[in-house]
Amino acid sequence: MDWPLIAKERITGRYIVFMAEVPLYGKVEEVLAAEIARGDLQTGDRLPSEDELLTRFGVSRITVRRAIQNLIQRGVLEIRRGLGTFVLAPKISQELTKLTGFVEDMDTHGRKASARVVSKSIVAANEIVARQLEIGRGTRVMRIQRVRLADSVPMSFDETYLPLDVGKKIVRNDLRVKPIFTLLEEKYGFSLMEAEYKLEAAAASAQVAEALDVPKGSPIFRIERTSFTEDGAPIDYETLSYRGDLIRFVTRLARKPAVKSTQAKASRSLRKR
């Protein structure tokens, strides 16, 4: 990275700043970033081809590739295999303050949510699934795998596990358009009251990478979420793999009053007596 060089004159004590010249790839990067910010290139637009950029800027191929790679790292562009390079929507800030589903989250941000169903199958609950759904290991459950999209861009790969009797009802519906939360509450009468979240950083497995159209090993947020009904029974266990370049999670935490201050006031009160 090119940083300004700062030197101090010994006699006058003044500071003199020498600005290092911006490299060519940096100039190309900032021109493209400015066009995206102005709306000349909008979300979902395909970037001009590499050859077109070479002609426009009169620079080398490696310079153009470095500029594009930097914009990808900044979350401004993404490469879609076999299609080209496209402008991304700004990163979504998702608040972790209440239990909501993907469709509700995207509606909040003015994004059109959709889903692609990868599989629906009956499987034996492994140790983790059994523990989260409070059933015996090996019990048959319904597993549903979906890719969740916002404005047609893959955002998350979801793997949902449901008790078999509930899951059989859910899979009768068109899960491309019907959210599971909505079906549970509005069609089948389950009141979802709360959920336990576990969030960690991870690298995309081959399956997740293919589903989200990103390179294997790309950074993702992996969330384990178990949702409970009003009687405290677990009804839905999910692993959600969100693209790390497209979303960030935000919450607000309250701090308890310091115990020390209360104890100090009590001590001062006793001393006064």
Image (cartoon, rainbow, N blue to C red):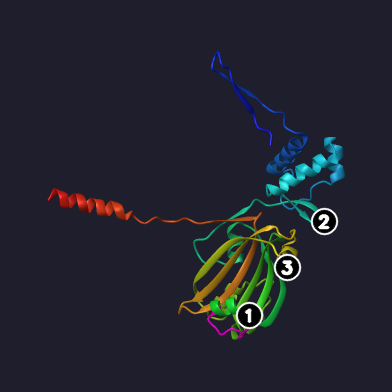
Residue underneath mark 2:
83
Of marks 1 and 2, which one's residue comes earlier in the chain? 2
- Asked if the residue at tag 1 contacts the one at tag 3, i.e. Cβ–Cβ closer than 8 Å, the answer is no
Q: Judge whether 165 appears above or below 108 on screen.
A: below
Kindly identify the residue that appears in the image at 70 percent across and 78 percent down. 120
Residue drawn at (52%, 78%), measured in percent from left and top?
Answer: 234
Seen from the viewer's position, the closer of residues 192 and 270 is: 270
Total number of numbered discs in the rendering: 3
Where's residue 94, x and y in %?
57, 58
Callout 1 secondary element: helix
Residue 140 is covered by the magenta coloring = yes
Image point 77% across, 43% down: which residue? Answer: 66
Residue 183, above or below 20: below
Q: Residue 206's x, y, as percent?
A: 74, 65
Residue indicated by mark 3: 207
Residue 136 visible? The answer is yes
Mark 3 or mark 1: which comes first in sequence? Answer: 1
